[in-house]
Amino acid sequence: MSMQYKAIVIGSSAGGLNALRTLLTMLDADFKIPIIIVQHTSPSSDNYITTYLNDLCKLKVKEADEKEKIMSGYIYFAPPNFHLLVEEKFFLSLSIEERVNFARPSIDVLFETAAFTYKEKLIGIVLTGANHDGAMGLRKIKEFGGLTIVQDPKTAEVNSMPLSAIKATKVDHILSLEDIGELLISINRNFL
Amino acid sequence: MENKTDLTQDNINIEIDLFLEAIFQKYGYDFRNYGKAHIKRRLLHRMQLSKAQSISEMQYKVLYEEAFFNLILKDFSINVTEMFRDPSFYKNVREEIIPILKTYPFIKIWHAGCSSGEEVYSMAILLMEEGLYDRTQIYATDFNHQILRKAKEGIYPISKIKEFTANYQKSGGTKSFSDYYMAKYESVIFNNELKKNIIFADHNLVTDKAFAEVHMIVCRNVLIYFNKDLQNQVLKLFTASLLPGGYLCLGTKETIRFSEANIYYHTIIDNEKIFKKKLQLESTGS
Ligand SMILES: C[S@@+](CC[C@H](N)C(=O)[O-])C[C@H]1O[C@@H](n2cnc3c(N)ncnc32)[C@H](O)[C@@H]1O
């Protein structure tokens, strides 16, 4: 059975920029599944990450705009100091509500709202990081029948975020960054 | 394949619509066109805290207990704010907008969705330093009467002062920030002098009419909680309330570019989301 996934959500924190570079540069321009990312940053940081990755990636990398439609061929990042939510009908929206798990943007907020919207057609990925944000969100994705992937803690720059995610739910795959990339590429071949 | 989570999810969405309808009919607050993801998150969170089994159970509660409604109002309104939030915004207002406002004998400013007042006092300080405050009337409105009371008091936890001060300095403040407040125990209270030209009022952007004719509207980080239709509706209200040549200031992530209101404005400072209402609608050009 080949599953038609409609979106990928990724959460990363400490060590995330390197991990994201490794993973995202593996994807070719024909990668169809939209990717939505929360990378923890300082509230006052500029758009360095998106500019940097946009130069390196074959897909278009951008900071998410308020009420932007989620589209194939794009990688969206939560803006610093805003939570990023997925709305019904596949729009993105922003919020400045309180921090969740000490973080704004929070991975759990993105994962949970994405799970509500995409249900079993969602892939959730937790990468390197020094806290437990994303664990509850990944559990939600699993509850809805989505595919859950965690970076192998042995290969993560900081392992507590992957470890917390693995503890919170029965994840489908625990893989190195390269293997996550290969898996996504093979899933993309089934994307219509 | 319809499994149990799907069913529950469909039901939850129906229950949320009914819940919002109940609030509208009973209390007159209209959340039906707020962003659904945001509303759902807040409601599921409240459900957990209040140990309710379902949204329907909360609907009963909200109809019969006004205290519970006030809690929901607080959940939905997201009162997170700070003084001189986005310092570069205030810097731009100070350097680009104030010189033009100074040419008027008297100005009116409307802060819509002012929350606990930090944004309003920031503006009052800026106007004072620029010598314009005595010629200004500020209207500060919010639909949450609980938070408006806090705004009127102008009392904030002392723990926030460090951040406020840093923001103030980055925004181009010319004085010592501590001149503007007095510390008392764990709080600071802002000077009465800052309050003298501010009128705080209960106003709902969704259901109330235009407020006054003003030279500048500041409405930051409120529109992000509305869906597109409601954003258009509220922007229309703003356009009707602004004098020709008046300024509309939105949050850093909000824009009028893709809205129906776009034709009525020039973009003045794109990064800071400052727009100027056209003197008249031209038939040519953008
Ligand atoms: C996130 S705060 C923004 C505060 C401040 N403007 C800032 O940017 O820091 C949003 C505010 O909008 C208010 N609000 C939400 N819906 C409203 C409505 N329909 N009418 C008036 N105020 C509203 C909320 O009560 C809250 O205080």
Image: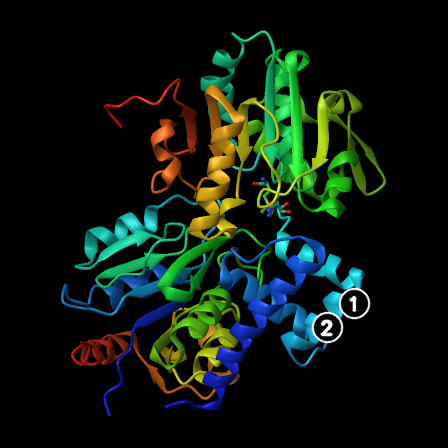
Give the quarter of the image for residue B112: top right
Residue A159 locus on image (x, y percent): 45, 74
Q: Is mark 2 within 8 Å of ligand 1?
A: no
Q: Which residue is mark 1?
A: B64
Determine which quarter of the picture holds residue B118: top right
Badge 2: residue crowd in 10 Å (few <14, some 14–19, many ≥20): few
Within the displayed image, which quadrant is ligand 1 positioned in?
top right
Q: List the residue tagged with mark 2.
A: B60
Marks 2 and 1, Cα distance to the nearest angstrom? 6 Å
Q: State the quadrant of the C terminus of chain B.
A: top left
In the rendered view, would you say B251 is above or below A111?
Answer: above
The amino acid beneath tag 2 is: Tyr
Residue contact between numbered discs 2 and 1, judged by CB atoms under 8 Å? yes
- Residue B39 vertical placement versus A115 (above, below): above
Specify the subunit that label 2 lies on. Answer: B
How many neighbours does mark 1 have within 10 angstroms: few (below 14), some (14-19), or many (20 or more)?
Answer: few
Task: Name the quadrant containing residue A53.
Answer: bottom left
Q: Position of residue B83 (x, y in %)?
A: 62, 35
Residue type (three-letter) at the residue carrying disc 1 = Tyr
Q: Is residue A31 left or right of residue B66?
A: left
Residue located at (61% from left, 12% from top): B132
Q: Nearer the viewer, residue A172 or A114?
A: A114
